[in-house]
Amino acid sequence: MFADNPQYILATGIKNKEIIERERKNMAGIALIMVYISLFILIAVIFRFIPKQDKKFLVMLVLFAVFIRILAALFLNIFLFGNGIYSPDSQSYHTEGIRYASRINIENLFILWPPPGQGYSFFVGVVYKIFSEFVSVPEVLNIFLSVVTIILIYYLTQQLSNKTAAKISAVLIAVYPSWIFWSTQLAKDIPVIFISILLLYVFIYKTKLKYFFLVNMSALLFLLAFLRNYIALFIGWSLIIAACVIPKIKIREKITSAVSIISIIIILFQILGFGFIGEKLFTNQVNWTGGRSNECTPTVKEAINDLDIARQSMTHANSAFFKEYHFTNLASLITYLPIGFVYYHFSPFPWEMNSFKTKMFIPEMILIYLSWPFIVLGLLYTLKNKFRKAMPILFFTAVLTGFYIIINSSVGTIVRWRMQTYVYLFIFAGIGISLLFKRKSKVNCADTSCPALDQ
C-alpha cells in the first residue's frame, strides 16, 4: 500500500540515512574509546622497561603530556575546527586513506605499496581498514608517538649530559606548542620525527656492532624513507659520518663497524632509488623546472636554480617574505642564509601578530626566544665535551635546518617545519639550563670537563 508512495520512500530513505549516521557515530565513539584504552595500555607496557629511578618523573610527565594532548585534541578538532580536518595535507591523507582502505587486501598489499616518501596515506588506509574511516584513530596514534618521543628525548639527553638536563629537555618537548598541536592532527610529522629520533637513539645507545643493531637500523631507515624520503637521506648521511668517528673502541672494531654501517646504508639508498649518496633523490625532489631529465645530475647552477624555484613556489602565501629575492648564483644563496636563519628561528615576529592565528603562536615564540641562549650554551658544551657521541644529532639537525632555511619563504610553513628541528634543539636547551644550575651551585664547569654532568 505504502511501498509505491514516493513520500514514504523518501521519508524511509532519510530515516535509514539517519540511522546509519547514528550507528556510524556510535561506532566512532566505541573505536575511539578502544584506541584510548590501547594507548594507556601501551604506555603502561613501555613503563615496565623504564628503570626504577626514572619511573616516577617520567610517569608524571607522560600523564601530564597525555592529558594536555587530549584536551588540545578536543578543543582543536571539535570546537575550533568543528569536527573538520585542519590542513590541506591532512585532508589529502584522509581522502587517499579512504581510497586505499577500499582497495587494500592481502592479495594486492604489495601491489598497492607506495613509492618512498608517499607512504603515510597508505598507512592511514591500513588504519581505516582495521578501525573504519575514523580520522580520530590515527590522530590518537600520533598522540601516543609524541609521548613516547618525550621518553626517547629524555634518554638521548641523558647520554649527552645528566639527568637534570634530561628532565628539562623532556619538559620542554612536552609543553612545546607546535609539538602538542601536530600530535593531535592527521599528519605524518609526528611519525617521521619519532622514527628519526628512535633511529638516532638506537645508533647512540649501541655499544658493539651486532646483527640485531644493524637489522634495527635498516628497518627504521626503511620506514623513515617510506614516510619522508629526504629525511631518511639526511639521517643516512649523518649515520655515515658518525660511523667514521665512533669513539672508545679498538681500531679494528671501529673499521668493521664503520664499513658495515656505511655499506648497509648505501645498499638501502640503492634499493630505495636514492642513488649512491642520494644524488637521484635530490635531482627528483628538487627539480621543479620539468625541463631537465631527472636522470641527469644537475650542475651547481642548475641545482641553485631548482632551489630558487622551490623557494619561489611558496611566495604566493600571505605570510611569504622576501618575495622578490632570487638565487642567481652561489653567492646570492649564501647571502640569503642569515636572512633565512632569522626568519626560520624567530618568526612570526611580534609586529606580525595582528590576527587570531598569528597570536596563537605567542606562547611558542616566548618559549623559543627564552630557550635560545641556553640552546647556544648547550651546543657549545656538547661541541667541546660530547662532540663524537652527538655527531649524528648535530649533523642531521644542521643539514635539515639548512635545507628548510633555503627552500622556505612562508612563515606559515616555517612554523610547521621548525618543529622537526626544535625537538633536537631542545636537547641542547636542556643541557644549557642544567649548566646554569651547576654554575649557581658553585660547580666550575668552565675549567673542567664537567664529570658530574655525565653521571
Image (tube, rainbow, N blue to C red):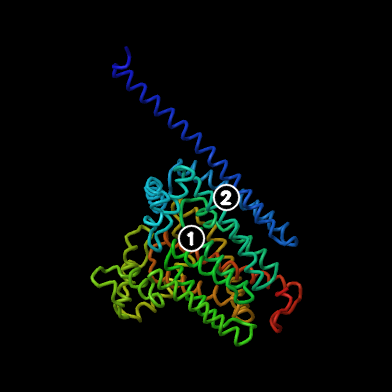
| Residue 331 on image: x %, y % | 35, 81
Residue 279: which quarter of the image? bottom left
Residue placed most toward the observer, 321 or 8:
8
At mark 2, the secondary structure is helix
240 shown above or below 433: below
Residue placed most toward the observer, 432 or 207:
207
Horizontally, residue 269 falls left or right of residue 206, namely left
The residue positioned farthest toward the left in the image shown:
291
| Residue 212 on image: x %, y % | 58, 69
Horizontally, residue 411 falls left or right of residue 424, namely left
The numbered mark, 1 or 2, whose residue comes first in the sequence reads 2
Tag 1: residue type?
Pro
Label 2 Cα neighbours within 10 Å, binned few <14 / some 14-19 / many ≥20:
many
The residue positioned farthest toward the top in the image shown:
1
Tag 2: residue type?
Arg
Q: Residue at x 49, y 66 (%)?
A: 346
Label 1 Cα neighbours within 10 Å, binned few <14 / some 14-19 / many ≥20:
few
Q: Quadrant of the N terminus?
A: top left
Q: Residue at x 29, y 19 (%)?
A: 6
252 shown above or below 377: below
At mark 1, the secondary structure is helix
Residue 325: which quarter of the image? bottom left
Pair 1/2: label in front: 2
Say if residue 417 shows up in the picture.
yes
Q: What mark, if any, has residue 247 been given in the picture?
A: none
Disc 2 designates what residue?
Answer: 69
Disc 1 designates what residue?
Answer: 350
The residue positioned farthest toward the front in the image shown:
107
Residue placed most toward the observer, 303 or 281:
281
Residue placed most toward the observer, 151 or 225:
225
Q: How many marks?
A: 2
